[in-house]
Image (spheres, rainbow, N blue to C red):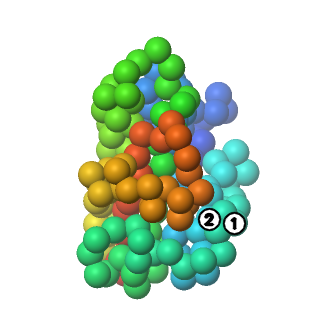
Amino acid sequence: MWAAFGINRPSGDRTAPYWRHVMVIDVYAAMEDGVWLYEPKTHTLQRYLSEDIRAATGLQDFVATAPLNLVYVAHGERMTDISPEERRLYASVDTGFIGQDVYLFCAFRRTRQRFSRCYRICLGSEGIFALWHLYGGHAGLFRFSKRYF
């Protein structure tokens, strides 16, 4: 989780760059025992949902049984003075930076992983937002699945 978007400097800056120095991405861990929100300041996972919703995090069959699906939620309401299209663009770029950090960590650990941009599926689906209890202002959901540890 730290490699994804943890704090790596005394100033509070993160392991990945982000748009205009505004943190718009939250990282969630979807696992068999529920969904957990990563809290970088304390480097802890906080329970967000008790249900196993891994199957709803993507279209591929393997996501339902992957031990870990990282889900990146972009909060568009934190991006001011730009259009919705620009919010999606910058959220996608920030998520790409975070995903790259996770890939590098997994490559170092020699684990299998897969990164999917679920924006196309999830943005228009009120069902996925309702499942995550997310409403209004979100730029999209992005998912990373760790197939094997």
Q: Disc 1 on helix, strand or loop?
A: strand
Q: In this rendering, is residue 78 above or below 125?
A: above
Q: Which residue is mark 1?
A: 47
Question: Which one is nearer the viewer's eye here, 57 or 36?
Answer: 57
1 and 2 marks in contact (CB < 8 Å): yes
> Which numbered disc, 1 or 2, marks the residue that appears first in the sequence?
2
What residue is at 55 percent from the left and 47 percent from the top?
Answer: 135
Furthest residue toward top: 81
Question: Which one is nearer the viewer's eye here, 63 or 105?
Answer: 63
Q: Is residue 15 left or right of residue 89?
A: right
- Tell me the quadrant of the picture where the C terminus can be found: bottom left
What residue is at 50 percent from the left and 75 percent from the top?
Answer: 53
What residue is at 45 percent from the left and 62 percent from the top?
Answer: 127
Which amino acid type is shown beneath numbered disc 1? Arg
What residue is at 34 percent from the left and 68 percent from the top?
Answer: 58
Q: Quadrant of residue 51?
A: bottom right
Residue 84: image x %, image y %? 37, 28
* Residue 110 visible in the displayed image: no
Question: Which one is nearer the viewer's eye here, 116 or 103?
Answer: 116
* Residue 55 visible in the displayed image: yes
- How packed mark 2 is, by other alpha carbons closer than 10 Å (few <14, some 14-19, many 20 or more), is many
Q: Which mark is residue 36?
A: 2
Residue 119: image x %, image y %? 32, 50
Which amino acid type is shown beneath numbered disc 2? Trp
Real-space CA distance between mark 1 and mark 2, rounded to the nearest whole angstrom: 4 Å
Residue 8: image x %, image y %? 57, 41
- How packed mark 1 is, by other alpha carbons closer than 10 Å (few <14, some 14-19, many 20 or more), is some
Q: In this rendering, is residue 57 above or below 7?
A: below
Residue 19: image x %, image y %? 43, 27
Q: Is residue 1 left or right of residue 122?
A: right
Q: Disc 2 on helix, strand or loop?
A: strand
Q: Quadrant of residue 102?
A: bottom left
